[in-house]
């Protein structure tokens, strides 16, 4: 702690007095800087949640597109058709042609790249 009267301590006291004066002139009566901090924190948290929600929706949309591509390329019509008067269900319409098991424990950073490379390899092999 600096002794009283040092320039740094006087500057901090003047700054805090100037900041208090500015806040007092800007804020409505009864609103303290703590109120401003709480409201600003709440708005920041809300913005963060909105961004996280948008990112999750984008990620889910990307996964749906990948799942549709994999299904289109690696599923073939089921042999023998479906039972029940010729009406086929979505599950009975296609049977798995290829199953790929991917060990993915603690691999969330490397998994998207590995899936892209694997799908590219399998697409090249399929054609």
Image (spheres, rainbow, N blue to C red):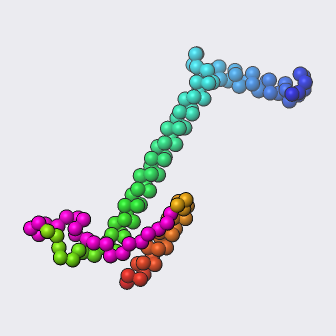
In the displayed structure, 40 sits above or below 78; it is above
> In the visual, does 81 lie left or right of 12?
left
> In the visual, does 119 lie left or right of 35?
left
52 magenta-colored = no
> In the visual, does 73 lie left or right of 4?
left
Q: In the rendered image, is residue 26 in sight?
A: no
Image point 39% across, 66% down: which residue?
A: 66
| Residue 69 % position (x, y) | 36, 69
Residue extending furthest top?
Answer: 29
In the displayed structure, 53 sits above or below 58; it is above
Which quadrant holds residue 60?
bottom left
Task: State which quarter of the image contains the N terminus.
Answer: top right
| Residue 53 % position (x, y) | 45, 47
Image point 47% across, 68% down: which residue?
A: 102
> In the visual, does 21 lie left or right of 47?
right
User: Which portion, as a residue range, is magenta?
Assistant: 84-104
Q: How many numbered discs, if any?
A: 0
96 magenta-colored = yes
| Residue 27 % position (x, y) | 60, 22
């Amino acid at each position: 702690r600096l002794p009283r009267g040092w320039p740094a301590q006087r500057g901090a006291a003047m700054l805090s007095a100037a900041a208090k004066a500015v806040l007092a002139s800007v804020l409505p009566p009864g609103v303290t800087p703590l109120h401003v901090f709480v409201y600003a924190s709440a708005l920041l948290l809300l913005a963060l949640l909105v961004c996280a929600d948008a990112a999750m929706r984008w990620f889910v949309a990307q996964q749906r597109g990948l799942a549709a591509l994999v299904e289109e390329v690696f599923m073939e019509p089921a042999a023998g058709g479906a039972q029940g008067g010729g009406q086929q269900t979505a599950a009975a319409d296609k049977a798995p042609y290829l199953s790929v098991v991917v060990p993915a424990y603690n691999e969330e950073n490397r998994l998207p790249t590995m899936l892209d490379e694997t799908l590219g390899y399998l697409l090249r092999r399929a054609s």
